[in-house]
Image (cartoon, rainbow, N blue to C red):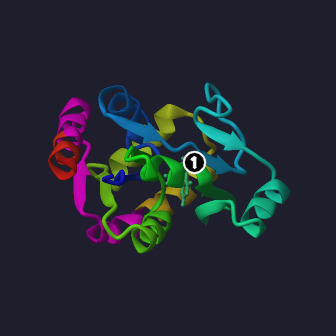
Amino acid sequence: MKKGKFIVISGPSGVGKGTICNQLLKELNAWYSVSMTTRSMREGEVEGVNYYFVTKEEFKKRIEDGKLLEYNIYNDNYYGTPKDKVLEKLEEGINVFSEIDVNGAKNVKKIFPDALLIYIAPPSIEELKERLISRGTEDLETIENRLKIAADELKQAHFYDYVVVNDNLQDAILKIKNIINEEII
Ligand code: 5GP
């Protein structure tokens, strides 16, 4: 039986990744891998839907037990992909869709060389800053840190199979849908 494809979507926070991924989930035939994190829950987020929220101790235990496919530390917090369910779905021929950072994407590519990596880029770092400030979910220091990470990530975006600039949400969604449909058939 044909195995499922691992689809990675990356991009800095504030780029519109969440909205894009929600829309893709409704329209794509794929299973979404909910990540595990030690960061605190943002307003509106739901346990088991956006993330599995755990303590650093719990996260480290998962690492020791080999329960994570990949993990990374981002802005002082751990983020990782729970392993068992992902492997099960891929074996069943189901495409798996995941939202992870650049380091995670690199690790996924090592494990699944035919994974499809898509990077969503902001029109500019200035525009990203505006979006993060107007979202209002983080303080200025966190925003500045995230912008530094974003600038660094952007330099590595060439590593991805595709880079889609989100200057218009609906256009970006359509582009990503077309890429996935073309790559999966
Ligand atoms: P946020 O705190 O904005 O939800 O996520 C911060 C960063 O962590 C984003 O770049 C996001 O894609 C990344 N991330 C989320 N889940 C995972 C994961 O399971 N593994 C890795 N490596 N990064 C993740």
Q: Amino acid at mark 1?
A: Lys
Badge 1 element: helix
The residue lying furthest to the right in this view is: 57
**Quadrant of res 158:** bottom left
**146 sits to left or right of 57:** left
The residue range painted magenta reads 151-177
Q: Looking at this view, is 93 or 17 the one in front? A: 93
Q: Give me the residue at 19% from left, 35% from top.
A: 174
10 Å crowding of disc 1: few (<14), some (14-19), many (20+): some
Magenta stretch encompasses residue 152: yes
**74 sits to left or right of 150:** right
The residue lying furthest to the front in this view is: 1
Percent coordinates x, y for residue 157 in the rendering = 31, 66
- Magenta segment's dominant SS is helix
The residue lying furthest to the bottom in this view is: 110
Percent coordinates x, y for residue 83 in the rendering = 60, 56
For residue 105, above or below residue 53: below
- Residue 74: in sight, yes or no? no
Q: Give me the residue at 37% from left, 38% from top.
A: 30
**48 sits to left or right of 157:** right
Q: Which residue is mark 1?
A: 85
Q: Give me the residue at 23% from left, 50% from top.
A: 164
Percent coordinates x, y for residue 91 in the rendering = 44, 53
Q: Give me the residue at 38% from left, 32% from top.
A: 25
- Residue 124: in sight, yes or no? yes
